[in-house]
Image (tube, rainbow, N blue to C red):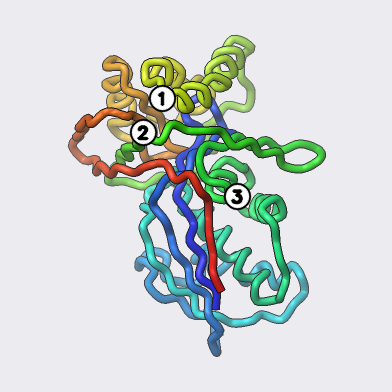
Amino acid sequence: MITIRVPMSTSNLGPGFDCLGLALNGFNTYRFEANRKMELVGFPKEIDNTSNLAYQVYIDCYRKNNRPLFPVRITFLQEVPLCGGVGSSATAVLASIIAYHAFVGETINREELLLEALEYEHHPDNIAAAIYGGLTAAIITAQGVKVEKFTVNPEWKAMLLIPNMSLDTTKSRSVLPKTITLEDAVHNLGRGILIPEALKNGDEDLLASLLEDRWHEPYRLPLIEGAHAIIAYCRIRGIACFLSGAGASLCVLTKRDISLSFEGWETRVYEVSPTGLSYEK
């Protein structure tokens, strides 16, 4: 038996598209134990079936390595919202890969885990944050994935704004442009490289000024009713707000005790998780 605890994560952080990720202290816990057949326990109804990602990735690990399946019961304890944009799929992928290697008697380090998880997630932002914890920047190179972890002021809180709708990641990616202008590239790059400094120093004013994105938010926000208005509301008031991952959730980063409430949106508050996933056999 192995129990794996994986943190949720918010990604992009505005202009840090597909590179920046921030781990938060909401965790999904997966317990894998030997069983006569594959079985799921504790999953929400909408993912309590054979299309469940943890189920599918676990089976696929055996298939692609030409090994006979070792059936397990996967018991799930949920803390990460299934709202899109906070790395719930990354928690499932990482847990199943770790479980597979444990049951076949192999060890896997963080770099190998990240590479293997990329086969399913296709971009490294959420999985890097979930593995390493804190704020990470991850890029894919010809030599593999490069990850840098940054210091984050512990006073930051993440306020997650969750709409009463879901947004399919495939649809959210389909609306993105195939090319960007030089002006928009400079706009995003100049802001993205300063985000780690703002989070390290706890500089709310600086962070709020950096989060305007031109690569993905202008195309995704119209898919989420009310999202554009909420971001505009926050930015006028100097509140750091951005679309979490591909959406549909929004994320506010602040050190202040502020209260935000919008009709049709649920609010949850998290701290930054300085450490990544953990597991015990």
What percent of the width, then of the height, locates residue 109?
A: 69, 57
CB-based contact (under 8 Å), mark 2 and mark 1: yes
Q: Locate the N terminus by quadrant.
A: bottom right
Question: Who's the residue at 61% across and 16% down the image?
Answer: 185
Q: Is residue 214 above or below residue 99?
A: above
What percent of the width, then of the height, locates residue 3?
A: 50, 70
Q: Amino acid at mark 1?
A: Gly
| Foreground of the two, 222 or 228 | 228
Pointer 3 or 2: first along the chain: 3
Q: Amino acid at mark 2?
A: Glu
Q: Counting other residues with Cα less than 10 Å from the Cα at mark 3, is it few (<14), some (14-19), or many (20 or more)?
A: some
Mark 1 vs mark 3: give the one in front: 1
Question: Who's the residue at 61% across and 19% down the image?
Answer: 180
Q: Which mark is residue 121?
A: 3
Kindly identify which residue carries mark 1.
202
Which of the 4 image quarters holds residue 104?
Answer: bottom right
Q: Is residue 58 above or below residue 168?
A: below
Kindly identify which residue carries mark 2.
155
Distance CA(mark 2)–CA(mark 1): 7 Å
Mark 3 vs mark 2: give the one in front: 2
| Foreground of the two, 96 or 247 | 96
Pointer 1 or 3: first along the chain: 3
Q: Amino acid at mark 3?
A: Glu
Q: Is residue 192 visible?
A: yes
